[in-house]
Image: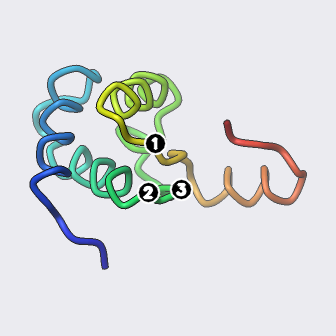
């Protein structure tokens, strides 16, 4: 389990302010922030509304980078397996 830290909280606040995530997606922003702060390569989820959302992902990644974190790849399990099996890169 990854810890929720003051750094992840600050990043989650920025994600909610600037990414287009709705205020009701606080837990989703926290999941992204915790993954980024702890340098996770992937955040795999079936939540396509906020986490594995192709329209939000570029904004989320840009905010993470602006805040000096490497963003995790946000994808569904199916996307991860498909890209891994076919040798595609995520970034």
Quick one: label 3, few (<14), some, or many (20+) residues within 10 Å?
some
Q: Earlier in the sequence, mark 1 or mark 2?
A: 2
Please give the name of the residue rendered at 67% of the width and 50% of the height, measured from the top-left corner: 79
- Distance from Cα at disc 1 to Cα at disc 2: 7 Å
- Distance from Cα at disc 1 to Cα at disc 3: 11 Å
Name the image quarter holding the C terminus.
top right
Q: Position of residue 53 (x, y in %)?
A: 47, 35
Please give the name of the residue rendered at 29% of the width and 72% of the height, measured from the top-left corner: 2
Q: Is residue 28 left or right of residue 58?
A: left
Label 1 sits on residue:
70
Please give the name of the residue rendered at 20% of the width and 40% of the height, measured from the top-left corner: 11
Label 2 sits on residue:
39
What is the secondary structure assignment of the residue under circle 1? loop
> In the displayed structure, would residue 40 be above or below residue 26?
below
Q: Earlier in the sequence, mark 1 or mark 3?
A: 3
Q: Position of residue 61 (x, y in %)?
A: 44, 31
Q: Position of residue 62 (x, y in %)?
A: 42, 24
Eye-nearest disc, 1 or 3: 1
């Amino acid at each position: 389990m990854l810890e929720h830290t003051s750094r992840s909280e600050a990043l989650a606040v920025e994600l909610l302010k600037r990414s287009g995530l709705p205020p009701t997606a606080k837990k989703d922003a926290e999941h992204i922030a915790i993954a980024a702060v702890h340098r996770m390569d992937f955040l795999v989820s079936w939540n396509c509304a906020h986490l594995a959302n192709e329209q939000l992902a570029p904004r989320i990644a840009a905010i993470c980078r602006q805040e000096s974190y490497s963003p995790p790849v946000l994808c569904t399990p199916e996307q991860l397996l498909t890209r891994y099996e076919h040798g595609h890169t995520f970034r």
